[in-house]
Amino acid sequence: MDASRRKFLAQSLAIGCSAAASPFVTPVTFASIPSDNRLVVIVLRGAMDGLDICAPLGEPVFRQYRPGLSKRDFRDLDGFFALNENLVDLLPLWKAGELGFVQAVSTPYRDKRSHFDGQDLLEAGLAEEGGNVRDSGWINRMLSLIPGAEQDSAFSIGRESMLILRGDFPVTSWAPESRVDMSPHGQMLLDAIYAKDPLFAQAGQTALTLAAQLSMEQMQGDGDEEDAEMMAEMLKSMRSSQEAQRASGLAAFAAERLKEDTRFATFSIGGWDTHLRQDRSIRNASKELQAALLTLHQQLGPVWDKTCVLCMTEFGRTVRENGSGGTDHGTGGAMIMAGGAIKGRKVYGDWPGLEEAALYERRDLMPTADLRRYAGWAAHDLFGLSVGQIENTVFPGVDMAGNPGFLR
Amino acid sequence: MEQSFATKSAFRFGYGFSPTDRDVAGVDDLMAQLRGPDEGVARFAGPMLEERLAIQRAYQQLRNTMKKGDDSVKPELKKATRLRNRMRGDDTRHLFQRAMMDGQGFRERIAFFWMDHFTVIPKGRAGNALWGNYIEEGLRPHITGSFGDLLVSAVTHPSMLIYLDQVRSTGPNSPVGKRKKQGLNENLAREVLELHTMGVGGAYTQNDVRQLAELLTGLDFNKDGAKFNKRKAEPGAETVLGKTYGGDPAKRSHIEAFLRDVARHPDTARHIARKLAVHFVSDTPEQSLIDHMEQAFVQTDGDLPSVYGAMLDHPAAWAPLGQKTKQPFDFMVSSYRALGVTPQDYKKPSNGQVNKQLILPMQFMGQPLRKAPGPNGWPEEAEAWITPQGLAGRLQWALTTTTQWGQDLDPRVFIDTALRELSGGTLKFAVSGAERRVEGLTLVLASPEFNRR
């Protein structure tokens, strides 16, 4: 081990010990909530084209609407719907009943087709844009209803601040590649200057505690020095590279937390706004999504069986291809679900058909269900929330009538 | 302690104090910054559009030659690549250098606001080569003029045409559309209404988006620059927001006529007034402030200095500080200024240094430059920035930067330079109690007092 590595390890360990022992830093507490189930929500930003991801090849008119895009090498799912070729590595999950879809769903958002309002509404879980939409997200409100939930119960992962987790209930967010190289004494002083500013105090405490904890965990390994060295090296390369910021990096970090006391994890995958040459432009985002789901599957181990992953987007895209081989902003879309806790190998939802008269405003897939209803039943079945709590607090105004029964 | 005019002005309407800047004495002082020539671009700017296009063309040609198997151009290509990359690094550096200048803080903050309002995320090779020019020639000459001119210039600049896919939108019944079976792409039309002018709450419909998309066809760009391509323009007139534009033959002036009309729309006045107030004054500004600015916008047909002036005239502009937090770019610029780093100190760092000192840290703080989350630009609210990972990014950058630039500074003096009367007893005590100079300086830069405005 060279000198700089030794110093790096020593410093990280020092931060770890002092943070735990310091009276100025409240360690993140690990209280687990009664349920052993996990919910992962992946927000797909940019409006994923559900008709390209889970394509209704059984619709006679589909190919007429999409002369270019329907040429893709789709893989059959159930004889009617088929999977986008860029997600082909997910087929084993489908066959195992651990991957499913919901078609023709949307939030209550209509008509203006703005990504930003659409995403806000999706994460806020509310029925109308404007007003207090950016104040709190639905996972945060859900946490406040679960007895025993603690700050470490919910994690948002990545550089962005996720509205879906924002709100009065304390939650944690972190980016896997973050670090703070401050002396223990400096950290104490920092804690003191943040004391009177709750926003800085909470962010600062979490940052220092997590930076310390994570370096401890990474350093300790199974106590073998060789291992520790390897981990340090990995950590270093992770920090310096873009890897950690990619979806698989976020998923790996999520899996680590979910194996501990975290019950909710959320992150986002962008790149779905495919106005142009969608045959190619949807590839990156799809590959990222595929890698994220496979990483969760691989790294969660036995916890995968207790996990439900919901991938949701702000709205769907036009049924017709546009003039540049892409699609424009639409309305009804698809939700992807995965995990050992779901009853997959099925495309859920009430399929409205693609005849022009059946389309929303004669251009978009008609939404036949509120996607909040599906998320609401996940909250009900996984964490025992009552229908009343969901209709009043988590997703105000949602109609929960009829459990689609997609959880085992 | 009572916050002085100079302090409020430096924090809320500028990039903070620097040891060499003189204090802003009053509103007239701020407004005077907007009247002169654009000193920032005069001192720090990249090549003009033509030259950038030429650099890009030369590079592209050499690449194509290489691809065809002619290795003899390898050294030339290497040079051309370096030239292109250098330009990109310079564009980033210039953004910081302009903002770091003394005596120009308000004007520079306004320039950043409009860069964000008309967000362009460079796409592809041409997008990256042109980005700096979009800011320098496309936006900045108009930010002290009328909103209509600014809108026309921003929306029709090649950078915007590439970014929001306008170059790929073709009238389905135009000659090109019929021959190549190409059609509309709604992207730019939607964002013009939703983001650039009326705002998402504005009185427009999906049909207006569609009609505007038809009207915008013909706006095009190729390797020689932006041009109007009649052969891609949808024939016939379009009705947008109840008014009919164009007709045959299609002309670029039809598009400009619409843009100038929508620039004066009452919904646009409201949207712009609100966004400015949120950016400068408070995440939740007083309605009376927005009303006052909106009125100035309407009365002057969008004369921007009048709108800025209305903001500065309103008492809400001079409420106590602390209602917003600095975004990472502002945090970095104001840190450099407080540390006494001048734009000249930043002369010609290598691209590697630009990457290490500017690009990566911004990414870690949650604001990757050139990569806003979307055409809506960066979020404004404090909660979006002061997250554990965002704050860790600020701390880590402050530790590195004070190590590089703060060797000769005494933290107990620095706290007064950076914060004057804003520094409280606890902060002073903590800073003087730090065990290392660098950590003392870092505490100042990481303090809520320095990060809030």
Image (cartoon, grey):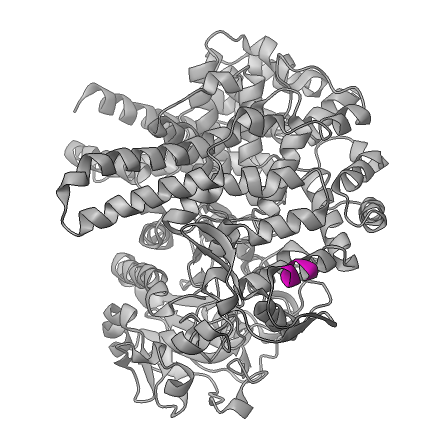
State the residue at coordinates (42%, 65%).
Answer: A276
State the residue at coordinates (80%, 50%).
Answer: B301
Determine the image quadrant of residue A372: bottom right
* Position of residue B147 in the picture relative to residue A260 (left or right): right
User: Residue B299: horizontal and vertical position, in percent?
Assistant: 86, 49
* Quadrant of the rendering where the C terminus of chain B is positioned: top right
Seen in the picture, residue A79 relative to A97 is either above or below; the reply is below
Is residue A363 in the magenta section? no
* Position of residue B5 in the picture relative to residue A242 (left or right): right
User: Residue A54: horizontal and vertical position, in percent?
Assistant: 37, 78
Q: Residue furthest front?
A: B249
User: Residue B139: horizontal and vertical position, in percent?
Assistant: 60, 42
Q: Which residues are magenta?
A: B253-257
Seen in the picture, residue B117 relative to B97 is either above or below; the reply is below
Determine the image quadrant of residue A136: bottom right
Camera-nearest residue between A124 and A10: A124
Camera-nearest residue between B45 and A139: B45
Q: Is residue A316 visible?
A: yes
Total marks drawn? Answer: 0
User: Residue B441: horizontal and vertical position, in percent?
Assistant: 52, 17
Camera-nearest residue between A269 and A283: A283
Is residue B254 in the magenta section? yes
Seen in the picture, residue A193 relative to A36 is either above or below; the reply is above
Name the dominant secondary structure of the magenta segment: helix
Q: Is residue A383 visible?
A: no
Camera-nearest residue between A240 and A380: A240
State the residue at coordinates (52%, 66%).
Answer: B230
Seen in the picture, residue A206 relative to A301 is either above or below; the reply is above
